[in-house]
Amino acid sequence: MKAFALYGKEDMRLEEMPLPAVGEGGLIMRILACAVCGSDARMYFNGPTKRYRLPIVLGHEFSGEVVEVGPKVAGLAKGDVVVASPVVPDMTCRACAAGKDNICENAELFGVHLPGGFAEYLYVPDHMVHIGGVVKLPPGSDLKAGALTEVVACCLHGLGEVGGVSPQDEVLIIGDGAVGLTFVQLAKLMGAGRVITTGRRAKRRELSRLVGADEALDATAITSLPDYAREHGLSPTLVIVAAATTQAAQDALKVVRSGGRVLLFSGYVPGTELVIDPNAVHYRELHISGSIDCTIRDFQRAATLAPRLHMGELISHEFPFSRTVDAYLATKEADAVRVMVVAE
């Protein structure tokens, strides 16, 4: 099969690779669509971190068609359109025993340790199929939108870490990329009373309103978010940081209502440090949570939500598989939201 392998900073090569023999409980899927996640783009433009098993086929947001199954696979068959969770947990470590298989102590990830979706085919090992990590998309699902199931699952997990949302919640989402726009949809679906986004790009602000935001603030017109919040009565009970800047995190802690919750969702450059006033956390009784990836249960639930969301609206660019490198370059464009690579 053909696959794009990352060797280092801005060094991605189209290569011929063998597919593993299908185990008794494993399967092979033909990749139909794979999105360029922000972490994929960072690894390409900045160079992969030490945890990546080089050369590696990136890509963990994908959908595909099952083309071969092992003899012991139950519930999945050739021709099924499926998605796969990004984390392959061992389900035996302390984290997995506590239901936190997203932070499995011995996890492997597609596109990090195992070949990912920027390839013609992908092999899913027996263990992953057995624990329910491969999920059929509902009939009639958009294959490209389905590839973003992982985004939905990770955002679902994040909302679970802060206790979900209710009609009493005013939710502020700092950042309106694909993740921020997914949080908008889920918060509204869960009944949030008011959802506000902040962002710097006009197209994304339009998308924010299109997918359900009650208000989309132009961050370029706001000198200080805390000052803006005081002047305009913005007092969110939940602030989601979906922008990888320390300023966004610091602003979140200042604008959130006393007794409120802050979700630090974005990944940062290794070594980044955040200055926090412990008295503000203590006396205002703030609750700070982090979130990474998703559990198998999150992923399964996310797949069932596909018909109720508008993930396809987040796809701003589309490239054929042969132009995968161009897809990565397109993530730098001003109007990029999620860039998708599709089978030819």
Image: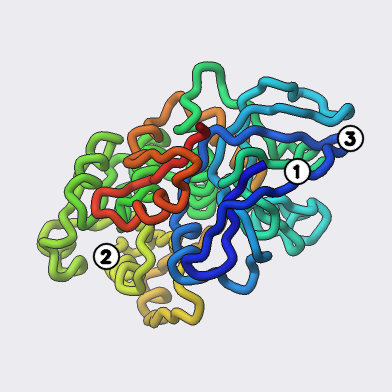
Residue mark closest to the camera, 2 vs 1: 1
Residue placed under numbered mark 1 in the picture: 19
Residue occupying image coordinates x 57% and y 48%: 60
For the N terminus, the image quarter is: top right
Residue type indicated by callout 3 = Glu
Residue type indicated by callout 1 = Leu
Residue occupying image coordinates x 53% and y 54%: 161
* Snapshot quadrant of residue 263: bottom left
Mark 3–mark 1 Cα distance, whole angstroms, equals 15 Å
Q: Residues within 10 Å of mark 1 (few under 14, many from 20)?
A: few
Q: Is residue 137 visible?
A: yes
Residue placed under numbered mark 3 in the picture: 24
Residue type indicated by callout 2 = Val
Q: Residues within 10 Å of mark 3 (few under 14, many from 20)?
A: few
Residue 232 in picture, x, y percent from top left? 12, 57
Residue 203 in picture, x, y percent from top left? 21, 45
Q: 13 above or below 274?
A: above
Q: Is residue 166 visible?
A: no
Mark 2–mark 1 Cα distance, whole angstroms, equals 51 Å
